[in-house]
Amino acid sequence: MSSATTLITNLLRCILWLVRHGIYVIGFSGRRRGNGTDVVTVRVAASPYLYRLLTDANWLKQHRDGNLVTHTWQAIRFGTVIEWEEVTCVA
């Protein structure tokens, strides 16, 4: 129960922090990692401001669909993963 309370509290702190900085929150999800720990991910809309706000952001993955390349980025705040995608055209 304590772990769930901590995850939910950190999720709320993270979402409030993002909204206060003008970042649009799309949604969130939780999952259990292979090592048995739980993690919550908040998905946000891409914004140039994210790079100034989340200076420790890491590139996570990319995939290509025709002429479009989608880059997925992530950062961690309040023990919560913040994730967003950017789409570019390579044609």
Image (cartoon, grey):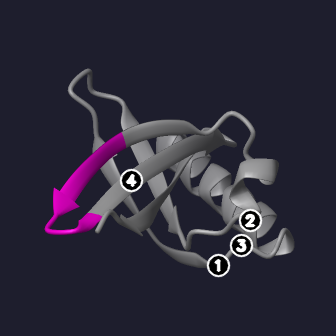
Q: Position of residue 74 (x, y in %)?
A: 51, 45
Q: Using the image as rendered, state which of residue 47 and residue 3 is in the foreground.
A: 47
Q: Are marks 1 and 3 in contact (CB under 8 Å)?
A: yes
Farthest left residue in view: 66
Amino acid type assigned to the residue bearing label 2 in the image = Leu
- The residue mark sitting in front, 2 or 4, is 4
Q: Secondary structure at mark 3?
A: loop
Q: Using the image as rendered, state which of residue 36 and residue 81 is in the foreground.
A: 81
Q: Disc 1 designates what residue?
A: 24
Quadrant of the image containing the C terminus: bottom left
Q: Earlier in the sequence, mark 3 or mark 2?
A: 2
Quarter location, residue 14: bottom right
Q: Disc 3 designates what residue?
A: 23
Q: Disc 4 designates what residue?
A: 71
Extent of the magenta region: 61-68
Q: Earlier in the sequence, mark 4 or mark 1?
A: 1
Q: Using the image as rendered, state which of residue 16 and residue 84 is in the foreground.
A: 84
| Any part of residue 80 in sight | no
Q: Secondary structure at mark 2?
A: helix
Q: CA distance from mark 3 to mark 4?
A: 18 Å
How crowded pointer 3 is (Cα within 10 Å; few <14, some 14-19, many 20+) is rated as some
Q: Are marks 3 and 4 in contact (CB under 8 Å)?
A: no
Q: Is residue 13 left or right of residue 59?
A: right
Q: Is residue 1 left or right of residue 61?
A: right
How crowded pointer 2 is (Cα within 10 Å; few <14, some 14-19, many 20+) is rated as some
Q: Which mark is residue 18?
A: 2
Q: Earlier in the sequence, mark 1 or mark 2?
A: 2
63 is within the stretch colored magenta = yes
